[in-house]
Amino acid sequence: MSSSSEITTPEVTSSQTTRPTEPKRPDQSLGDLFKEMTGELSGLFRQEVELAKVETREEVQRTAKAGASIGVGAVAALLCITFLSTALALLLDQAINTALAFAIVAVLWGIAAAVLISVARKKLREVKPLPETTTSIKEDMEWAKNLRS
């Protein structure tokens, strides 16, 4: 009685074994193999370029939509800030000199601007453009290296 957990290995004949020094495709000339390899590399390069184009086009469209929304929001925010700043300066004007009141409001906005610019610069350093294309190109370079060996 044989158990189902037994593992059988097929016999390997001498024609099935390959030697590292024997060519993998002895029926093709070196020129044919080189032509095939350059054709594959050329096709791969075209695919990478197309991927970069598609990825860039998608990112530009998303960025444009976000930019339009930010632009409209920025105009509204600018109007709001202008009116609130004027109101704060006029409120301070009741207790101190008018010029000093407006100067205090301007200094507050200067501090806020410096903090916001610092945060934005930090976020911009973290941006990784075309992540999929970069990864794919690295994989293709590794594939090409392995192809040579």
Image (spheres, helix red, strand yellow):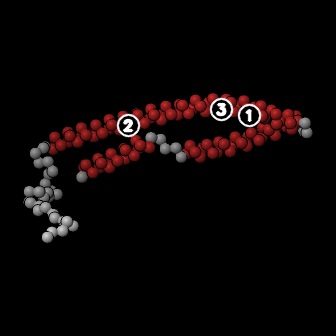
Tell me where residue 22 appears, x and y as whole percent: 13, 54
Determine the residue located farthest toward the bottom in the rendered image.
1
Q: Is residue 122 left or right of residue 130?
A: right
SS label for mark 2: helix
Residue located 47% across and 41% down the image: 129
From this viewpoint, is residue 110 visible?
Answer: yes
The answer for how far apart the CA atoms under marks 3 and 2 are is: 34 Å
Q: Earlier in the sequence, mark 3 or mark 1?
A: 3
> Depth check: 9 or 122 in front?
9
What label does residue 127 carry, if any? none
**Residue contact at pointers 3 and 1, CB within 8 angstroms:** no
Say few, some or many: other residues with alpha carbon within 10 Å of mark 3 (under 14 / 14 to 19 / 20 or more). Answer: few
The label shown at residue 81 is 1
Residue type at tag 2: Leu
x, y percent for residue 116:
66, 42
Q: Report whether 40 appears left or right of 118.
A: left
Q: Secondary structure at mark 1?
A: helix
Question: Residue 82 at x, y = what percent?
Answer: 75, 31
Q: Residues within 10 Å of mark 1 (few under 14, many from 20)?
A: few
The residue type indicated by label 3 comes to Ala
12 to the left or right of 73: left
Mark 3 vs mark 1, CA separation in Å: 10 Å
Q: The N terminus lies in which quarter of the figure?
A: bottom left
- Proximity of marks 3 and 2: CB atoms separated by less than 8 Å: no
Is label 3 in a helix, a strand or a loop? helix
Q: Report the front residue among 140 and 3.
A: 3
Residue that label 2 marks: 51
Going from N to C along the chain, the mark reached first, 3 or 2, is 2
Mark 3, residue position: 74
